[in-house]
């Protein structure tokens, strides 16, 4: 029987265990350059015992930023600063992937430079508010991306992925979940386009598929993972028939040979099983445990074959040496969701796993 503490080969990298650290927004890239800090290097190095670390979301372009003090990977200064983080993790024997996250309509003009405004597949505002340096502000109506801007956004992801490898990352995860830009293209209520980037299922999966393809060509598919959250209502999302859409997306990209698929699971375990069966490679689950944080019981998903790896969010914040504690059966420090960015993350999230 395979367990969480058996090694696994991921995209040619030998991982010490099958416990992944989920991406978690931390908002610690202080200053106008959106560059990682020494605090971030310490934070990730402390958690290098994870089989795989996936970083907080990193914007691939200035307009992709949706929260205050989140880091980028689109300037030379950011690349140099991230090198201090990856070097620190590698000194501790860890493996770290950069998560590239364009937030799309989730954000606010006050967070963006040079008069930019949030963009999206269609001009549909999200209900709710976003945290800014001036406090919570209502989401604004985003500007619809033109065809040329869609192409530029795809190029931005590919360039940021190259920058990630230059910065010393072992690979890249594309964030296609949680109501951000890629997810907005996938969902019918946020993508009202009638051109080749919307309309039917094939049109709505096109943006995600072309980003994955472009990044795979830029850095090699063995260095690339994709995160999805079918049916996740977080950030005012709605999907009537996620099984059809996500099955079509996986069919479109399954031949590329990606390092893994990372599923932020919803309450529909049958859909999880469907996608597990459809995916030919390594399958990582951030399991649905809301309102509780993911705990030791999730390791059974590896033992029964539901997943190849399990991703932990909140428990990794409270327990930097989480794999050791899981192997020993505890004890565990108790996470406090009120200390996480944004406090209450309703939806299919392991509190801070944005």
Image (spheres, rainbow, N blue to C red):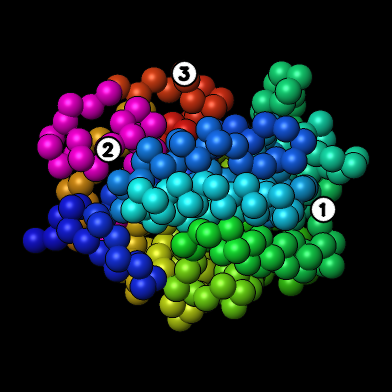
Residue 69 horizontal side relative to residue 250, left or right: right
Q: What residue would you read off at disc 1?
A: 144
Q: Secondary structure at mark 1?
A: strand
Q: CA distance from mark 1 to mark 3?
A: 34 Å
Residue in the picture at 17% in, 58% down = 6
Residue in the picture at 30% in, 22% down = 334
Where does the magenta region start and end?
308-333
Q: Secondary structure at mark 3?
A: helix
Q: What residue would you read off at disc 2?
A: 322
Percent position of residue 133, x then y:
73, 23
Residue 60 horizontal side relative to residue 341, left or right: right
Q: Mark 1 packing: few (<14 Cα in 10 Å), some, or many (20+)?
A: some
Which residue lies most toward the left here? 1
Eyeballing the image, is 301 above or below 29? Answer: below
In this figure, what is the number of numbered marks? 3
Q: Are marks 2 and 3 in contact (CB under 8 Å)?
A: no
**Residue 105, can we see it?**
yes
Q: Secondary structure at mark 2?
A: helix
Q: Earlier in the sequence, mark 1 or mark 3?
A: 1
Percent position of residue 282, x then y:
33, 66
Say the numbered circle drawn on residue 6: none
Percent position of residue 36, x then y:
61, 41
Residue in the picture at 28% in, 49% down = 19
Q: Is residue 313 magenta?
A: yes
Say the numbered circle drawn on residue 338: 3
């Amino acid at each position: 029987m395979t367990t969480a503490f058996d090694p696994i080969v991921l995209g040619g990298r030998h991982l010490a265990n099958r416990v992944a650290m989920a991406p978690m927004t931390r908002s610690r890239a202080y200053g106008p350059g959106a560059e990682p800090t020494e605090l971030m290097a310490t934070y990730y190095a402390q958690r290098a015992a994870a089989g795989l670390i996936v970083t907080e979301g990193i914007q691939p372009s200035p307009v992709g930023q949706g929260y205050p003090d989140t880091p980028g990977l689109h300037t030379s200064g950011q690349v140099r600063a991230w090198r201090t983080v990856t070097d620190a993790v590698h000194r501790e024997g860890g493996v770290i992937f950069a998560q590239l996250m364009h937030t799309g309509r989730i954000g606010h003009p006050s967070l963006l430079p040079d008069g930019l405004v949030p963009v999206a597949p269609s001009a549909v505002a999200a209900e709710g508010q976003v945290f800014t340096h001036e406090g919570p502000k209502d989401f604004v109506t985003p500007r619809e991306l033109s065809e040329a801007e869609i192409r530029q956004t795809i190029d931005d992801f590919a360039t940021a992925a190259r920058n990630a490898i230059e910065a010393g990352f072992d690979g890249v995860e594309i964030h296609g979940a949680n109501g951000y830009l890629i997810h907005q293209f996938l969902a019918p209520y946020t993508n009202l386009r009638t051109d080749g980037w919307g309309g039917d299922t094939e049109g709505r999966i096109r943006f995600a598929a072309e980003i994955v393809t472009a990044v795979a060509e830029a850095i090699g598919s063995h260095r690339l993972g994709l995160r999805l959250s079918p049916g996740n209502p977080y950030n005012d999302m709605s999907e009537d028939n996620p099984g059809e859409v996500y099955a079509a997306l996986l069919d479109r990209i399954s031949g590329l040979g990606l390092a893994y698929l990372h599923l932020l699971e919803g309450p529909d375990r049958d859909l999880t099983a469907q996608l597990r069966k459809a995916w030919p490679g390594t399958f990582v689950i951030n399991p649905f445990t809301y309102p509780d944080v993911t705990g030791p019981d999730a390791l059974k998903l590896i033992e029964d074959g539901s997943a190849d790896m399990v991703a932990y969010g909140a428990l990794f914040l409270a327990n930097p040496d989480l794999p050791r504690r899981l192997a020993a059966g505890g004890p565990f420090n108790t996470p406090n969701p009120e200390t996480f960015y944004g406090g209450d993350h309703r939806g299919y999230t392991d509190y801070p796993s944005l």
